């Protein structure tokens, strides 16, 4: 995976080719460090007969053991890097039960990068239980929905906090690849805290199986290394008089509210959300202005400022606002605010709060904008048609759902909600499901008129929409599932997987990509996967097979059918009936609000509290 991330394929590297030899910017240097109960540095200076290993056994106060040769040009030292990475899988085979000392390794990377800043990409597949900063098995599976569980969603570890702060100050960011074989506890809350403060990302493989997940891992590590990245960043947001910033959501460090956001590294897959409040003194004759300024160092060493300026109209009534409301932005902000409260409030309270906000928004709209409709009718705003579905999906998502869920998965998804953009959050909350067996002949090929790829229509996320004998591609922005009905046609299997695939049982459960065949359906499916891969962020679009009645991953498919009764919550129809009943009680003045939902200022307060005076 590292070799693929650093270098172009050899077949593309001819003398006449203009393709650069390395995928990382010219002038950038790379170094490799491994760690178990000790830290191993590698001298990769070009010309050495073999890479040299230096072992650091002082974990209390690790220092950089190499003056030169630790960071090298990947082009001039290609042979040395290739030899080391080729030999690594066999170098530690005699270490039967390695206990990784993660915090000392991070401190060693901090010491090595202090002078220049940079990016740390750390792979880990076991709980770091050795040396300073050792972590323990905090999650015993008990105390669900209690104060004890809330402590598992955050970290109080002073060592990891201190290292994270130091990394931000020195312009260093950390991306973690956490592979958990068999779903073992990894303490994502503590380890991921470093990534959250430094502007990095956590790639979490909750049930890592090497033959199946290795391609996804390789593609994601390549994306992580090659994507556009800024270092040692400072961000400031300004707005017009009458407005003020009320909150930030994302991966950054802010010492005091109102101070600039400090970010070790920021990349093209991160999003920072900003909420504003107003004091009621905005003049509708004047526009409102917003500016975000990001000062950062590019990967080529240039200090730059990126400015984003937005001008927005101001209106006295809310009618125009409701005509232009951005559903994805509203859902994303509610998701981010809810995720930020995971360590403060019980999950039950958060779910109740999401329900109350849904009812407040829709009842406010019903009260003020839809008087012409019959009193007993459920009326949804034109631009918030799917809002209720997204809110139900938010209640069902792994961060907030009731029932049993590992704390690592809860923490991972809640932090993802805080750092992802609007489109990624919407797709996570409601997946796109493509029926491969119903593709039209022209689907997934370039249109003759426009030249653009013809994207097939999607299917609603309900088992009631599943056809017998069907094959469905399910994309939620993080993973791609290929679910196949038990009564699928052998002809369809042969078209997709080749002439040897005559039954479901023959298919390899570790399959992660489609073979290249000359059949029409195979070309359509590969084109669709290529399209999915091109529009998503950092998560690779490799497939995971889910055969009905055979694969355990079928559970993942069932979880994605969000319109059905699952994830300890109602079906979409039952949810709408519940919301509609509450709206009617609100209009009649008979609704009793849940006390647990009382809270202070919120970015969507203008929507969640649509009372009559607000709109007059």
Image (cartoon, rainbow, N blue to C red):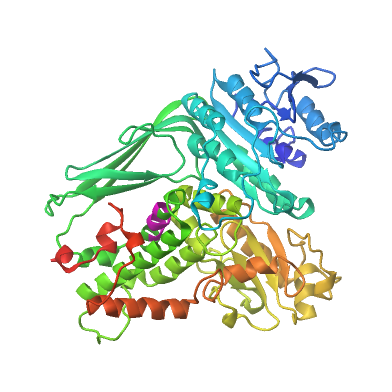
- Name which residue lies at 37% across and 72% down: 385
Say whether residue 594 is left or right of residue 311.
Answer: right
Vertical side of 519 occupied by 574: above or below: below
Pick whichever, 403 or 221, lies toward us: 403
Q: Is residue 402 left or right of residue 22?
A: left
Magenta stretch: residue 272 in it?
Answer: no
Task: Please provide percent x and percent y for residue 348.
Answer: 45, 62
The chief SS type of the magenta part is helix
Q: Quadrant of residue 325?
A: bottom left
Residue 443 visible to an observer of this rendering: no
Is residue 332 within the magenta segment? Answer: yes
Where the C terminus falls, by quadrant?
bottom left
Residue 395 image point, x, y percent: 47, 64
From the viewer's perspective, is residue 252 above or below residue 490?
A: above
Q: Residue at x 59, y 56 (%)?
A: 478
3, 173: nearer the viewer: 173
Where is residue 555? Give x, y as percent.
66, 68
Above or below: residue 184 compared with residue 349: above
Which one is in front, 184 or 377? 184
Compared with 66, 437 (above or below) is: below
Percent from the top left, x then y, of residue 49? 85, 19
Task: Give the magenta part as a residue range.
Answer: 331-337
Q: Quadrant of residue 349?
A: bottom left
Please tell me which residue lies in front, 520 or 499: 499
Residue shown at the point (65%, 40%) measured from the top left: 136
């Amino acid at each position: 995976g590292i070799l693929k991330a650093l270098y172009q394929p050899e077949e593309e590297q001819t003398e006449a080719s203009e393709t650069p030899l390395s995928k990382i910017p010219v002038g950038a240097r790379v170094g490799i460090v491994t760690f178990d109960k000790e830290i191993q540095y590698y001298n990769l200076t070009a010309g050495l007969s073999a890479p040299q290993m230096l072992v650091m056994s002082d974990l209390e106060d690790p220092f950089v053991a190499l003056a030169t040769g630790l960071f090298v040009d990947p082009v001039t030292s290609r042979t040395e890097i290739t030899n080391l990475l080729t030999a690594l899988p066999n170098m530690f085979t005699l270490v039967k039960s390695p206990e990784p000392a993660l915090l000392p390794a991070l401190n060693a990377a901090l010491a090595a990068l202090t002078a220049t800043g940079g990016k740390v990409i750390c792979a880990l597949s076991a709980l770091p239980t050795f040396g300073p900063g050792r972590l323990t098995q905090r999650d015993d599976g008990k105390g669900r929905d209690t104060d004890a569980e809330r402590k598992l969603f955050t970290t109080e570890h002073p060592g990891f906090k201190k290292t994270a702060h130091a990394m931000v100050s020195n312009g260093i960011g950390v991306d973690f690849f956490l592979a958990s074989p068999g779903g073992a506890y990894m303490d994502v809350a503590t380890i991921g805290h470093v990534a959250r403060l430094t502007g990095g990302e956590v790639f979490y493989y909750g049930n890592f199986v090497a033959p199946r997940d290795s391609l996804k891992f390789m593609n994601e590590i390549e994306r992580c290394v090659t994507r556009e990245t800024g270092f040692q960043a400072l961000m400031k947001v300004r707005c017009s008089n009458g407005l003020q910033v009320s909150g930030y959501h994302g991966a950054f460090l802010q010492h005091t509210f109102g101070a600039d956001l400090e970010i070790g590294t920021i990349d093209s897959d991160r999003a920072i959300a900003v909420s504003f409040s107003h004091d009621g003194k905005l003049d509708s004759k004047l526009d409102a202005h917003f500016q975000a300024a990001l000062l950062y160092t590019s990967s080529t060493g240039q200090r730059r400022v990126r400015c984003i300026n937005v001008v927005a109209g101001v209106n006295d009534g809310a009618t125009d606002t409701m005509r232009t409301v951005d559903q994805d932005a509203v859902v994303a902000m509610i998701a981010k605010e809810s995720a930020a409260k995971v360590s403060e409030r019980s999950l039950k309270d958060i779910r109740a709060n999401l329900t109350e906000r849904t009812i407040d928004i829709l009842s406010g709209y019903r009260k003020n904008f839809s008087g012409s409709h019959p009193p007993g009718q459920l009326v949804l705003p034109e631009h918030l048609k799917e809002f209720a579905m997204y809110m139900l999906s938010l209640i069902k998502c792994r961060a907030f759902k009731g029932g049993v869920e590992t704390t690592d998965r809860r923490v991972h998804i809640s932090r993802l909600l805080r750092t992802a953009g609007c489109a990624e959050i919407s797709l996570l909350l409601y997946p796109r499901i493509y029926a491969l067996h119903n593709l039209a002949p022209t689907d997934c090929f370039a249109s003759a008129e426009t030249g653009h790829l013809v994207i097939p229509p999607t299917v609603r996320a309900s088992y009631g929409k599943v056809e017998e004998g069907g094959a469905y591609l399910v994309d939620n922005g993080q993973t791609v599932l290929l679910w196949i009905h038990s009564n699928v046609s052998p002809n369809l299997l042969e078209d997709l997987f080749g002439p040897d695939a005559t039954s479901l049982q023959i298919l390899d459960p570790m399959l992660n990509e489609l073979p290249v065949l000359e059949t029409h359906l195979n070309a359509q499916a590969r084109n669709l996967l290529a399209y999915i891969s091109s529009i998503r962020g950092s998560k690779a679009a490799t497939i995971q097979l889910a055969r009905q009645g055979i694969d355990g991953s079928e559970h993942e498919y069932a979880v994605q059918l969000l319109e059905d009764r699952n994830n300890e919550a109602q079906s979409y129809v039952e949810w709408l009936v519940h919301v509609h009943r509450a709206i009617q009680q609100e209009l009649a003045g008979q609704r009793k609000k849940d006390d647990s939902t009382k809270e202070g200022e919120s970015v969507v307060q203008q929507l969640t509290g649509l009372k009559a005076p607000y709109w007059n």
